[in-house]
Structure formats: C-alpha cells, structure tokens
Amino acid sequence: MSNISNVGGISFSFSAEELGNMSVEDAAVAILANKASLMDKKVRGDIEAMQDKNAKLKKANDMLAKARAAFGSVDDDDDAKLPSEVKDFMEDNGIEIPKHSSELEKAGRDAVVNNLQGYTQQFTDENQLETTKFQQVLGKQQRANEMVSQVLQKMSEGLNARAKDLGRA
C-alpha cells in the first residue's frame, strides 16, 4: 500500500488504495478538506511569526525611546552615556554603534537614534510586506474553505434529489 505523499503541492495521509476505493465526490472532498487544513496551519504559523516580529518591533521602539530619554536632557556640548540596555540591544541585533559608545558626543547620540530609527523603519517595512502576503494567504484559505463548502453543498443537493427520486418510485 503506497501513500500518495504530494499531489499539486497538497500532502495526503491516505493510500492510493484508499483513494481508489473512494467515490469521486469523496475523493474531491478529502483533497479539498486536506488543502483547507494545510491553509489553516499556514495561517496559524504566519500569525505566530507576525506576533514575534511585532514583539521585536515593540522592543526596538522601546529602546529608541530609552535612548531619546537618556539623550534628551543633555546639552549639545556635553557627552552622554549610552544606556547599557540600549547598547546590548543594538549589539544583539547588529545595529551599528558609534565608536567610544561609553560617552557619546552629539554626533554619536544622533547616530544612535538614527540607527535605531532605521532598524525600526526596516522592521515596519518588512511587516507591511508580510501583512500583504498574509492577506493573500487568507484569501487562498477562504477560497479553499468555500470550495469545500460548495462541493459538500452540491453533494447534499445530489443526495436530496436521489432521495426524492426514490420516494417517487
């Protein structure tokens, strides 16, 4: 008994023999239901990934706010200390930190803020792209669910028509 593992990008867990024993309608419903199930899994995975990215974006915005707060009360001519939490975040995320980051002059402070802003903007742009892709996946999921519903409705109509015909006989 060989399993049909992938047909047209859709994975199955029933054997060729089981598929051969199904009516055309049953096989169509099984295939469409399987596709709908796969789309549901993809949507759930995409939602989790988007939530993770949103949490990272929130953290980046928090670090930007902390940097601004630390630098906001410093005169242009004075040096300011880069908060260690902000420095650690920047290092962990590959964000460029000006040299001599323990005490920053105005240009260094501006560079920190600009680099954090660039990082958050990149995240925002990526999230917008991911949202567009997610909307496409949701559309596919909706169409898959509609196809299952339509096939089941047609099968039900056919069975009802057969039952009426048997009732007349």
Image (spheres, rainbow, N blue to C red):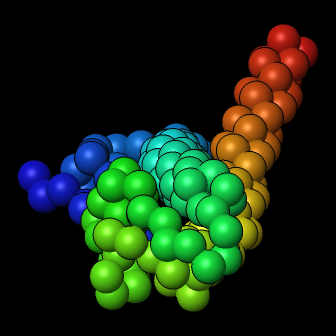
Q: How many marks are shown on the rendered structure?
A: 0
Residue 110, horizontal then vertical, whole percent: 61, 80
**Residue 91: quarter of image:** bottom left
Q: Is residue 115 left or right of residue 20?
A: right
Q: Is residue 70 above or below residue 129?
A: above
In this orientation, which residue lies closer to the viewer: 110 or 151? 110
Residue at 25 percent across and 62 percent down: it is: 5
Residue at 49 percent across and 72 percent down: it is: 79
**Residue 122: quarter of image:** bottom right
In this orientation, which residue lies closer to the viewer: 76 or 162? 76
Classify the position of the C terminus by image quarter: top right
Residue 34 in sight in this render: no
Residue at 29 percent across and 65 percent down: it is: 92
Residue 145, horizontal then vertical, whole percent: 69, 44
Residue 58 in sight in this render: yes
Q: Is residue 140 above or below residue 59?
A: below
Residue at 22 percent across and 50 percent down: it is: 15
Q: Is residue 147 above or below residue 113?
A: above
In this orientation, which residue lies closer to the viewer: 66 or 150? 66
Extreme residue in the left direction: 1
Residue 136, horizontal then vertical, whole percent: 71, 66
In this orientation, which residue lies closer to the viewer: 59 or 155? 59
Extreme residue in the top direction: 167
